[in-house]
Image (tube, rainbow, N blue to C red):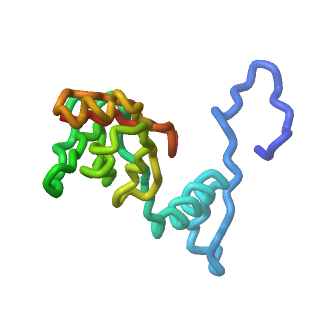
Amino acid sequence: MSPGTPVAPGSHAPPFYEERYCVLSEPEKNDAITRREFTVEAVMALLAGVTITVSGCGGSDNSSTPASPTPTASGDVSGSISANHGHTATINSTQISAAGAITLNIQGQATHPHTVALTADEVRAIGARTRVSKNSSTDDSHTHTVTFN
């Protein structure tokens, strides 16, 4: 039965009709495939050499385990950064002594920047070894919480 052939009332039509195509130069081998089979095989052949890489920060600002601060020079204060992936936050001793408002760039070894704005009162509190937590700027679709002391 060919496509579009009318079916007489009461007769049974085949469940579906597949038009088969020969993709070989030797049609007598009977290795014909359907259009769907050809498409699936073509897509699979294309994807066979594809490597899918997911990159990004790999975290959100809701991590309950901040990264440990890195050792710093005497008088410097390093902060712990939630969901860290290469960022560093350090207030140097000169900034602490000056006790003024500062904006830290915490990019470190990460592939994108973030900043953390601290008021003069927060810098003084950090210098006095009081715990201070601040959210970073939103960059690359996420933020981090930076905790000093």
Nearer to me, 35 or 83: 83
- Residue at the extreme bottom: 25
43 relative to 64 in the view: left or right: right
101 relative to 32 in the view: left or right: left
The N terminus - image quarter: top right
Q: Residue at x 67, y 47 (%)?
A: 18
Q: Residue at x 13, y 54 (%)?
A: 74
Nearer to me, 116 or 91: 91
Give the answer, above or below, for where 3 lies relative to 73.
above
Q: Quadrant of residue 96?
A: top left
Q: Quadrant of residue 21?
A: bottom right
Q: Residue at x 67, y 55 (%)?
A: 35
Residue 76, percent across and down?
21, 50
Q: Residue at x 42, y 50 (%)?
A: 105
- Residue at the extreme front: 98
78 relative to 52 in the view: left or right: left
- Residue at the extreme top: 10
Q: Quadrant of residue 116?
A: top left
Q: How many marks?
A: 0
Residue 120, percent across and down?
38, 32
Residue 104, percent across and down?
40, 46
The C terminus - image quarter: top left
Residue 108, percent across and down?
35, 57
Give the answer, above or below, for where 42 lies relative to 55.
below
